[in-house]
Structures are given as structure tokens and as C-alpha cells.
Amino acid sequence: MSNPIRVAVLGCGNVGSEVVRLLGEHGDDLTARVGVPLELAGVAVRRPQRHSDVPADLLTTDADELVARDDVDLVVEVIGGIEPARSLLLAAMKSGKSVVTANKALLAEDGMSLHAAAQEAGVDLYYEASVGAAIPLLRPLAESLSGDRVTRVLGIVNGTTNYVLSRMHATGQSFDEALEEATALGYAEADPSSDIDGFDAAAKAAILAGLAFHTTVTAADVYREGISDVTAADIASARNIDSVVKLLAICERVRDADAEAVSVRVHPAMIPATHPLASVGDGFNAVFVEADAAGQLMFYGRGAGGSPTASAVLGDVVAAARNRRSGGRGTAAPATSRLALRTMDKTLTRYHVSLDVDDRPGVLSAVAQAFASHDVSISTVRQEGRGSDAVLVIVTHTATDAALSATVADLHELAIVRAVTSVMRVEGGVG
Amino acid sequence: MSNPIRVAVLGCGNVGSEVVRLLGEHGDDLTARVGVPLELAGVAVRRPQRHSDVPADLLTTDADELVARDDVDLVVEVIGGIEPARSLLLAAMKSGKSVVTANKALLAEDGMSLHAAAQEAGVDLYYEASVGAAIPLLRPLAESLSGDRVTRVLGIVNGTTNYVLSRMHATGQSFDEALEEATALGYAEADPSSDIDGFDAAAKAAILAGLAFHTTVTAADVYREGISDVTAADIASARNIDSVVKLLAICERVRDADAEAVSVRVHPAMIPATHPLASVGDGFNAVFVEADAAGQLMFYGRGAGGSPTASAVLGDVVAAARNRRSGGRGTAAPATSRLALRTMDKTLTRYHVSLDVDDRPGVLSAVAQAFASHDVSISTVRQEGRGSDAVLVIVTHTATDAALSATVADLHELAIVRAVTSVMRVEGGVG
């Protein structure tokens, strides 16, 4: 049998320790898949004394030395964050090692440098675990759909926010109450800002858009709104129009001034209860893809956690190891174009607006005039209640986000509008 | 720029004509993906005069000559059926060409010969389109999950039967009525036996099991029941226990006599309405996968049609073309073991049984005794109605299929049982 392929693991937290465990437990299966054994060459950690589950002679605090070693073929990075992860991955690739990473923040900030380094060194760069953990997403987008044209990606890619919104729907809780429960149950971190404010989802949206449209998108390019302003009234409004509120990562292929462009954004939105994403509850993730020839596809699973993330990492390790044996290279395609980004104000969306209004003749006409004055066409309008409980619920056709938000600003100024009780974008409709 | 990669297409029906169209329309994108252009070298058809959409000089009736040509690099087979497809693919691989096929019947009957030929010739054999059309399934199973252990696959892999069952649920129609409607709407073929009797699903189950468990399974190994015996009473019974009836392709990793084995079967089953597969309606397909580390995953989309199938074919073409350029080989892993197959009588399942019974003391005891005599443990029992409308609804714990069917045979003989109105397996429960 040929020489084993030797794997270095950088970081040994939730994910890293699962990678180490699976490399051991699935050893025979992995050997069968790759053709030669996969051997653990070393594990870089900060505090070796905390990792009694790893043989002491494999632990090191010197990650730089580990990635430079001649007897290492593949490097797995599960430290997270920008540095030192980036420098270690670049050094590993420069010395001819293929790399596997779960690092969404790094990919979304500087995927271009990493892809360029992989290209130059002729090595593999795989990062399936960076979005949706074990849900196969990046390989399907980059490879299975590479003969098709992806037109839209709608994803629920953050489990914490999906759990909080699911609880708000199930119980009528306020955002603060649901977040408190999520924190108590371990679904939200002590400092939940990265999840709640949409930073995590925005990084994943950048990665998805890059692979779906073969372009370069960074996290900073992504329009981002979190869920902390979603109210119990929004949730109730959604239910009234047979919809649910989800935090969506949305990537669309669009045309601006006769050139291809992309729109990439993260925000809460109402989607119809019949949409396949609507029933994705609690901590699950799902990504809905539309392509010219393939039509509608959806990928669903647990989007976080040590084991699911390690599963995706090991799938990448096997692919990179097989390529190394066969002398081939992986097909995690780097960007081949740099499409323009459509800004949020020009993005076409639909709005749902709920208004407490005076119950008297002419109200609907005045409200409709506010929409018309910004060229926003109304799809449905419904009046509920009478007297002091009169409520108008309006769903618009698509219009630019700028026109819609200007309309809402005008509605706030109308004397007959007592309160704007809910404003939310609507997604997932036909077309 | 290097030489183009030249593609021969065998067959030009629904799928073939879409492949030809997309090769033309997505030409620039495909060139960007592969690095060199993909060129159509020829299209083998029976009646050239019927294909005015293909340049006449590319059409040929001599498929053997086309696959042997030196200026062909890749062969796409979308003829279907066993011969001449098999001989053509084997000849293509023998002459050093990578092949892409959508042929589920061939893969399920003789995938082993094809894989052996690919291995020997050092070429790629891809067949993503053979199951679930454009839904990326085979690459995720064979590659993304290659570092994990898949334990179970539950799939809705036939659109015709799913449409018929969905209509029976929606309307209360009988099987014959729903099938008639499906035929009129083009969802079922004039001779629907391949779909209705489960042959199509069984071929796909064999392919899924082979990739999920890295073993060899042929269509003949798959236990198969179609949906023609599903009654409106079965559908109503399912609704009463908050379930729906689906035709499932089921692949399980099991242990028999301390050795690994697999159970592969296709039959109608009740699954809980809350199961992710339950809401997969009409002509859609979905495959639910459980793996040790990844947990639960689901893949969803249109499982048939010219465009979705062509999308998957082109994804494979791009992968094979990239490999050809880079000198590597694909990772559509051939079987690495030959696991034993558990026969249906030894397979562990659960049954739902509905009985019309005499309403008198001792009935439940007599019925329970019939189950107990075969060591079948009852999970829930519910008595409905009184007098001549008395109905007993029983759901069992898991037992061998042989014990369950022997129990049902005994129930038919009991004097107090007026009729056995519904018997169906139950799947998709916890664990």
C-alpha cells in the first residue's frame, strides 16, 4: 500500500475534536474511500493540557511549524476568525498542501486571496463546512449546477435566528423573551450579536453568492438587517396573510443597465406558509435554489454543531486526499468574473405594511395615493376592524426598495394614519 | 487557448435535445467553468429527419461509429434502456472516453460492469441525472458524505406515484380515479406500470443504496411493492393518525449475525405529517438522509423532465471535462464492498392495521392475542365508533415483516374481525 496521507488539524474545539474523533473511528472506511490511510499528523492548540482525548505527542502549540512540516499533506483549519487562520492557510498552500476550512468569516472577507493562493500552488481549497455545516451546498452549487444558470438563492442559514423566530411564531413571545429562552437553552451565545444582527448570515450569503454566480462577493458587499426589530405584531401580521417570518439570505442574478449584476442581502422577510422554506423550524438550515434548467431545488439539514460540521470537513478531506492520490485537482471553482453589485435602494422587493387608521371615508384613497406617488403598485389591500380598531393591511407589487421605504416614510406623516404597526419585506412569491 | 473538449450525445429525445440546447446557449459559461470550450461533436439518433433543431452535419444514425471517433472526448448517453446503451458506454470507456449517463435502469442492473470498465480505462463515469434529475444526490452521497457513515436513506423518487398519492389525499379519490387524472394531465404515461408498480423507484433505490453504503445493489435485490393497492380507506386511515401515504425508497444499514448488511426496499408507507418528506407534493422528489455525524439531511426538487435532467447531465459533463483538462479523475466511487442483503421477511418494520370489529367484550383481548402470538408488540391502539361501526386502529412497534404479515393473516381468520380495512407499513418515526 502507498504512503498514508497525513492530516494536520488547526484548532481543537467543538469541531476540531470531532474531526479528530471521526478520523480515528472511521479510519477503515476512510482508507477504503481514499485508497490509502489518512493519518493524523498533529493538532495545533493553545492549551495542550485541555486536550486529553488527543495523544500528547500529536499536540503542539506551534501551528506555524505544523503547517510547514514536510510530513503533512493536508491542513484542516477549524480555528475560526481572520488571523492567524488566514496566514496559516496561505502558508500551508504555499508549501504545497491542500487545505480544508470551516471558516466562513475568512472566506467571506478574503476568499479571493485564498482562491488565488490555491490556484497558484495547484492545491485544493475546500470549505463545504463554512455554510450549512453538513448540508452539501457548495459542491452542488459549484459542481452539480455548473452546467446550469443559477438565478436565485434563498437561504435560512442561521440556526439561532431561526430558533428565535420559530419560538415567536409558536408562542406569541416578544423578540426579547424568545431570545432569552434561546440563550437559556444554549441556542444563542452569551453575546448573540453575530447571529441576531445578521453578520453570520451575511458571511454565508457572500459565500453562496460567489459560488452560485461565479463571482466575488465579500461580507461587506452584503446588505444586512438582523431580527432584533421583529415584533410580535409582525409575526401576527404574517400569520394573517398565511405567511411566516424568516431571516433570509438572498442572492439574485439581475440585470442593471444591460449588464449582469447580483443582489446579495440578509433581512427578515415574510414568506408564504406553503413555501418549502416556511416549514424549516428551530435550529435547522435550508437553502432554496432556482436555476434555469434545474428549476427549484432545496437542501435541508442541521446547520451547526460539532458533529455536522466535522462531517462536512471530513468529506472535503476525503476529496482532497483522493485528488492528491490521483494527481488531479478539485473543482471548487474560483470566481471567473466580477459582477457588479446592485445596491439595496435599487433592489426590487415587495413590502407588507400594516396601518392603524381612522375609520372614515377617504382613508384608503389617501393611503393609496402615498403608494402611487412613489410609483409603488399595490397587490392586495385588506381592511379589518371598525372604528378605533380599523386596520389596513397592504402588500405591494415589486418596486425599488428606495421607493418602498420613501412610501413608508410618507405613511408615517399622514394624519389619518394613527400608527404604522408592521413593515416587512415579502419574498418567496412566484417569479 | 487549448483544444476544445468534444462531446458526443447518444439519443435526442426530451433530455438529449435539452442537453444540445444548453451546450449551445450556455456556451460561454461552460467555457469559463471548464477552461476550454465544450463542442458538440455529434448526435446519434434513429431518425435524423425528426431533429431539425440540430445541425444536419452533426446528426448520425451510427452510434457505434460516433463513440469510436478519435475526435470525441466525452460521451453523453440519454437513450435509456439496457441495450444498446450498455455496449455503447462500454465501448466509449474502452476507447478512453469519459461517459455521462442518465440511465437508471442500466446503472441499477449492471452498474458493476460500468464501474469496472471506468476503473480499468481510467476514465470518469458520472450519472447524477439517473436519480432525482437535477437534485444533487449522488455527488453529495458519494463525496460530501464520504467521511461520514450514512445509516438510512428515505426517498420519494418517483413523481408519478407521488402525484397520484397527493391527489388521493387532496380529493379522497380512489387510486383508479387519481391515476386517470394523472394520465390525462401527462403526469403518468400511457403504460404506467414502470412507475405505478415501483420498478422505476426500485432502480433508483438500488443506485442510492450503492452510493450511500459503498456496496453493490442491483434492481433485482430490491423488495418492491407499488401503489395500485393503496385505497381511499388507507389514505383516510393515514389522516386519522396525522400521517400521509408516500411511496418510499428505503435503504438502511443494518447488522445481521454481527455482520454489516443492507435493507433496500420500495413500498407505500405512512409517515408522520410532521416529517420533512410529508409535505413533498405532486411531482416533486425528495431524498431524506441520516448519517452518524451529519444527522438529518434532505434534498428536494423536480425529479423528472427534460430540462432538470439535462441540468444534471451538464453538471456531470463539466466535471468530467475539468478532470480531463487537469489530468485528474472524478470521485464517483465504485463500490468498495459487497454487503449482504437482508431479505424483506427479516426486515424490521412497523405496521398500521385498521379493523372493522364486533363491538363486544373481549374483542380487544382477542386481537391483542393475535399480535402477541407472533411476538409483535403494540404501540398504540384506538377504538372508534360503537355497535356495527366499531373500528380498531392499531400501530405496532417494530417487528420482522414476516411476523407482522403472519399476524395480519391471523386477524383475517378471527371471527370477531368483520374486515381488515387497511394494512400499511409505517416509517419515518424517531430512531
Image (cartoon, coloured by chain):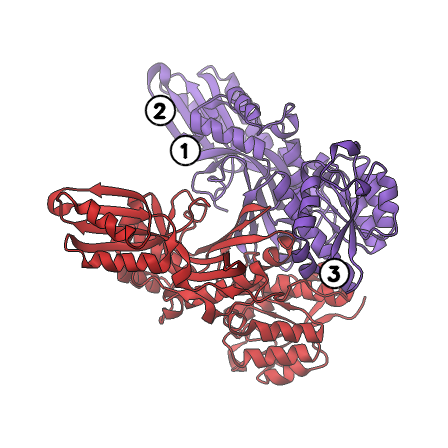
Chain colours: A red, B purple
Give B399 or A321, whichever is nearer the viewer: A321
Residue A133 in sight here: no
Picture disc at residue B241: 1
Residue appearing at x 83%, y 51% in the figure: B72
Q: Amino acid at mark 3?
A: Val
Residues at circles 1 and 3 in contact by the CB criterion of under 8 Å? no
Q: Position of residue A318 (x, y in %)?
A: 67, 63
- Mark 3 vs mark 2: which is more N-terminal? 3
Label 2: few (<14), some or many (≥20) within 10 Å?
few
Q: Is A395 above or below relative to A309?
A: above
Tag 1 subunit: B
> Quadrant of residue B196 in the image?
top right
Q: Is B253 above or below relative to A107?
A: above
Mark 1–mark 2 Cα distance, whole angstroms, equals 12 Å
Query: Of discs 1 and 2, which sits in the foreground?
Result: 1
Q: Position of residue B160 (x, y in %)?
A: 57, 31
Q: Amino acid at mark 1?
A: Ile
- Mark 1 vs mark 2: which is more N-terminal? 1
**What secondary structure is marked by label 3?**
loop
**What secondary structure is marked by label 1?**
loop
Residue appearing at x 86%, y 38% in the figure: B62
Residue B319 in sight here: yes
- Identify residue for label 2: B384
Q: How many marks?
A: 3
Mark 3–mark 2 Cα distance, whole angstroms, equals 69 Å
Tag 2 subunit: B
